[in-house]
């Protein structure tokens, strides 16, 4: 029996509710595939901040480094000013644990839930590889003359050769391993962001020509990519992009796959601690009502298993989610599923077993 130590952060709002169902499904997979998960729960989020003034203590971050994976529910509290928790927990964890890849599968399980006309599951199945440690989110910049008519605000996009190259290499390797279309598209804005994306584009073609000749390389501006997500999602296989563009286009990807209720993501350090989460927010208005959709958190658990090398267990969870979505769920939206939060978890766990 293989043992895995997993850190669990339920977080805010409905986060603990969806994580509870993800753990339920993970335990069902563990029973079937002779695995054991040892969970350590951490009190991190808005409630702790309001109670103690602590966002993410250094001692907690130090402990998180010892785990191969973190399962996160959600971060965001209505009584905490926006930015405090997001920067202090999410960005700090991603940056300090060098989770330099944000991995976002975009996969449609049931055509009923796609807002695009005549698009089927075979049309929407691609992955976005987003650089997760640089770009506009480094916090470089500042404000002078704040609150005056002469106020100046600067927010700088930081792109290093090291950061760009390791992201591109991950994307090329992922495209090779995925072996679907063996296509990798760089999404950028070379016609306007001529410094940052000159670096991205040169590195993209140099690495591709030298080390990944078997992978077809493509390029598209971010605005064209957004249009094609809606018009021709079947064109895409693997997309690689920077931090800000990746943040934006993955939310659009979530909508065409059925919404935030089914969208999961991984913050990956290929050789260290990685963190997996539903990409939706904490949805505090639904907290405690038992109506939130836990499937995105369950899919985050599935991504975690795949990262840990438990491919068979990961595939079993994905197949179970697909079965439940197609046969048992009326909607992917909170309060409209036709099942409670815990009932959805039970259905997926049963399908896994």
Image: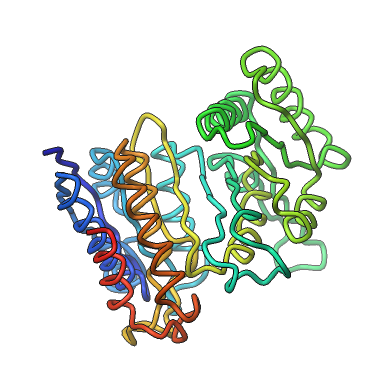
Counting labels gives 0
Residue at (29, 40) in percent of width and height: 310
**Near-viewer residue (7 or 178):** 178
Q: Quadrant of the N terminus?
A: top left
Percent coordinates x, y for residue 265 in the rendering: 47, 52
Of all residues shown, which one is farthest toward the right? 191
**Residue 256 falls left or right of residue 336:** right
Of all residues shown, which one is farthest toward the top? 210
Is the residue 308 above or below the residue 125 in the image? above
**Near-viewer residue (165 or 20):** 20
Residue at (53, 50) in percent of width and height: 105
Percent coordinates x, y for residue 172 in the rendering: 59, 28
The image quarter containing residue 166 is: top right
**Residue 78 falls left or right of residue 182:** left
**Near-viewer residue (2 or 103):** 2
The image quarter containing residue 351 is: bottom left
Percent coordinates x, y for residue 129 in the rendering: 58, 41
Is the residue 314 above or below the residue 199 in the image? below
Percent coordinates x, y for residue 242 in the rendering: 65, 41
Residue at (53, 32) in percent of width and height: 174
Is the residue 267 above or below the residue 198 in the image? below
Q: Quadrant of the C terminus?
A: bottom left
**Residue 194 falls left or right of residue 64:** right
């Amino acid at each position: 029996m293989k043992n895995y130590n997993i850190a669990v952060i339920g977080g805010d709002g409905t986060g603990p509710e969806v994580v509870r169902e993800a753990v339920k499904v993970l335990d069902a997979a563990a029973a079937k595939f002779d695995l054991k998960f040892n969970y350590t729960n951490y009190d991190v989020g808005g409630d702790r901040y309001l109670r103690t003034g602590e966002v993410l203590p250094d001692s907690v971050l130090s402990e998180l480094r010892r785990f191969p994976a973190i399962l996160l529910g959600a971060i965001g509290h209505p009584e905490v000013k926006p930015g405090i928790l997001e920067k202090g927990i999410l960005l700090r964890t991603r940056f300090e644990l060098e989770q330099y890849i944000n991995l976002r599968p975009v996969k449609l399980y049931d055509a009923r839930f796609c807002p695009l006309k005549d698009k089927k599951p075979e049309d929407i199945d691609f992955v976005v590889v987003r650089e997760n440690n640089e770009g506009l989110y480094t916090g470089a910049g500042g404000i002078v003359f704040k609150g005056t008519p002469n106020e100046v605000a600067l927010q700088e996009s930081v792109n290093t050769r090291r950061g760009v190259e390791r992201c591109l290499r991950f994307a090329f390797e992922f495209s090779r391993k995925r072996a679907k279309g063996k296509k990798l598209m760089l999404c950028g804005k070379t016609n306007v962001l001529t410094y940052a994306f000159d670096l991205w584009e040169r590195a993209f073609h140099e690495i591709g020509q030298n080390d990944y000749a078997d992978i077809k390389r493509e390029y598209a501006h971010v605005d064209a990519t957004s249009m094609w997500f809606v018009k021709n999602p079947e064109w895409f296989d693997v997309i690689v992009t920077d931090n800000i563009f990746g943040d934006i286009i993955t939310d659009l990807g979530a909508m065409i796959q059925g919404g935030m209720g089914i969208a999961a993501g991984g913050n990956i350090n290929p050789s260290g601690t990685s963190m997996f989460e539903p990409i939706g927010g904490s949805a505090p208005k639904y907290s405690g009502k038992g109506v939130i959709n836990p499937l995105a958190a369950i899919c985050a658990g599935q991504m975690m298993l795949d990262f840990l090398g438990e491919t068979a267990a990961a595939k079993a969870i994905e197949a179970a989610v697909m079965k439940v979505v197609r046969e048992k769920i009326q909607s992917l939206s909170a309060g409209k599923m036709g099942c409670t939060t815990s009932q959805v978890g039970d259905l997926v766990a049963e399908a896994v077993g």
